[in-house]
Amino acid sequence: MTNRRGFTLTELMMVVVLVSIVGLMLTMILVRQSRFHRAVQDVSEARNRMRDIATIVPTDLRGVSTSQNDILAFGQDSLQFRAFIGTSIVCEFVSNTVIGLPPKVLASGNVFSAWINPPAPGDLAYIYDDGTQVGNFDDSWDRFTISDTASSTSTTWCSSGLSPAYTAAGDNTQRYRITLASAANTVQIKRGAVIRFAREVRYSGYQAADNQWYMGYQTCTPNAGTTTPGTCGTREVLAGPIKPMTTDTNTTGLFFKYYDKNGNVLTTTADIAKIARVTINVRTASPSVRAAVATAVNNITGGDSLRFVVAIRNRI
């Protein structure tokens, strides 16, 4: 029989080594690609967190009135103010302290009640007061604290039998009633008067139990009849994690800066009614960066940042 030569041990070892080198190179390429895509996703998520802040805060802040003391407290890392959450009209006076509101959507398709969140006890209701004179020179917005709320599908609430009628007969959609802490002037406040609802809120940076830093949101109980900031409740996470909070505006994860109409920086409570615009700066780091410095969360480097300006509309 003819002798057949096979692979020698040396040749087999060379093949194994070459295959291992090729496999290692492919693995390294795949790992790098995976890290690259994860880093891109991390950056995208970090920017989404900042966009959440840039969307929510201006919505609440832009419509406040500094001249009417809607901003209650301000600082480098926090801002407390009355945020408007919705509007409606006076459909009926059940009594001088109980006001009926029309359904959110009428049978005709018209909308007279609209809000981000339904009014709740502790919220404020600003109701348009026609005054006693013809014209609007003595008109005003009367402020009331809401002590209770209720809802029902009963057609006897905001009935179509009232004149003028705001609902169609048989419309059994949800209706609302608010109870005011003090009596309204039912002579000067007429049916159809506009109501604006406001809620005292606080935005601030804070460190959570996981040692990460976040921007938080709180609802507060107003101090009736005063401009003193109310007591705020449980803090909810609005966005984050962000970089750690510091006193250095060049490195901190969140800070507010306040200006008057001439561009002068405001820092004292005495100037609170002069605030014309607010600059908000947010800095965040991606999860991959935070993981790399997990043993030193207060020394995060790298990340992304966002700065936006909110102009206060109602300053007269």
Image (spheres, helix red, strand yellow):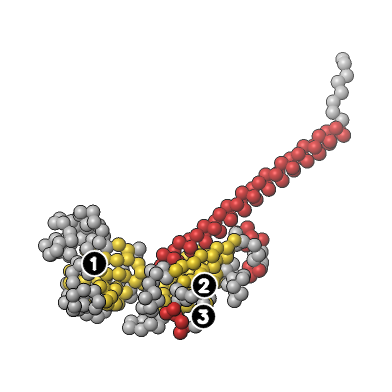
Q: Nearer the viewer, residue 8 or 293?
A: 293
Location of residue 174 in the rendering, given as x and y in whole percent from the top left corner: 23, 60
Which badge, 2 or 1, comes first in the chain's sequence?
A: 1
Mark 2 — residue? 256
Viewer-proximal residue among 299 and 160: 160
Q: Is residue 208 visible?
A: no
Which quadrant of the rendered structure holds the C terminus?
Answer: bottom left
Q: Observer-nearest residue: 302 or 209?
A: 302
What type is the residue that disc 3 sits on? Thr
**Type of the residue with mark 1:** Ile
Residue at the limit of the structure toward the top, as seen here: 1
Where residue 189 appears, as percent x and y from the top left, is 20, 74
Q: Quadrant of the N terminus?
A: top right
Q: CA distance from mark 2 to mark 3?
A: 10 Å
Disc 1: which residue: 89
Residue with the mark numbered 3: 267
Report the Cα–Cα distance between label 3 and label 1: 38 Å
Q: Secondary structure at mark 1?
A: strand
The image shows a total of numbered marks equal to 3
Q: Alpha carbon of mark 2 to alpha carbon of mark 1: how far?
A: 35 Å
The quadrant in which residue 290 appears is bottom right
**Three-letter amino acid code at the position of disc 2:** Phe
